[in-house]
């Protein structure tokens, strides 16, 4: 905004030019102070400088955070206690029960095919051997969980999801084998 006043002045041009008259604005009072405003281009340049400064500050802060995180010691995953591992929603019960059910179903069905003896008779013949086998399978399944090992590794078709599914099916299969033996009064096969 200017404090000087401008008045139009008529200037006559020679006939050789295209325009016969032109209006030119000239200041009347030259002694007054003229205050210059910032142009829109100046505002845009200032905004751009502020944005660049903000980006630089944010980038340097992010780099500092990453560097601090890289220098910070990584704490190993805390191994669950026995109570946590064997809790209702813990990692142990379903894995252990599934593995034992797979073992029990294959062993019971195999022994029935070989000897024709029902599961109850098989258990009476070798209770200590069956108990030791189940204890060893349970311990072998529980020890990695208590050490905090990651149980999500896959080796081809063998993965934790397939193991849980097979364990659940084996639990149902073993329960169906026991139910059918109870209904029939003897070995299924």
Image: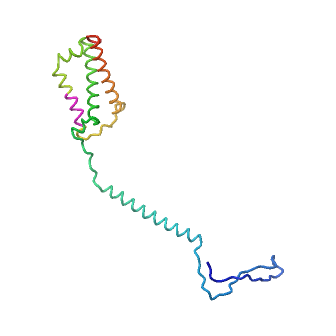
Residue drawn 25% across and 26% down? 100
Q: Is residue 125 magenta?
A: no
Q: Position of residue 175 (x, y in %)?
A: 29, 20
Q: How many marks?
A: 0
Please identify the quarter of the rendering in which residue 84 is found.
Answer: top left
The region drawn magenta spans 135-144
Residue drawn 33% across and 37% down? 153
Please identify the quarter of the rendering in which residue 31 is found.
Answer: bottom right
**Image quadrant where one finds the C terminus:** top left
Please identify the quarter of the rendering in which residue 114 is found.
Answer: top left
Q: Examine the rendered structure and indicate whether residue 81 appears above or below residue 56.
A: above
**Left of 170 or right of it: where is 54?**
right
**Image quadrant where one finds the N terminus:** bottom right
Q: Examine the rendered structure and indicate whether residue 127 appears above or below residue 67.
A: above
Q: Position of residue 109 (x, y in %)?
A: 28, 17
Q: Examine the rendered structure and indicate whether residue 150 appears above or below residue 177.
A: below
Q: Residue furthest bottom?
A: 31
Q: Position of residue 97 (x, y in %)?
A: 27, 28
């Amino acid at each position: 905004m200017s404090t000087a006043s401008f008045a139009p002045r008529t200037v006559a041009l020679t006939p050789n030019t295209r325009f016969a008259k032109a209006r030119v604005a000239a200041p009347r009072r030259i002694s007054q102070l003229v205050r210059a405003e910032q142009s829109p281009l100046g505002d845009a340049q200032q905004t751009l400088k502020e944005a660049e400064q903000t980006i630089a500050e944010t980038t340097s802060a992010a780099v500092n955070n990453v560097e601090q995180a890289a220098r910070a010691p990584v704490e190993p995953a805390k191994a669950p206690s026995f109570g946590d591992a064997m809790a209702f929603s813990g990692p142990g019960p379903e894995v252990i029960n599934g593995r034992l059910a797979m073992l029990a179903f294959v062993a019971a069905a195999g022994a029935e095919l070989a000897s024709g003896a029902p599961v109850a008779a098989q258990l009476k013949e070798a209770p200590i051997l069956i108990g030791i086998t189940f204890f060893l399978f349970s311990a072998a399944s529980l020890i990695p969980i208590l050490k905090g090992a990651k149980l999500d590794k896959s080796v081809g078709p063998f993965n934790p999801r397939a193991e849980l599914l097979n364990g659940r099916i084996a639990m149902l299969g073993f329960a169906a084998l026991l139910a059918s033996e109870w209904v029939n009064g003897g070995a299924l096969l």
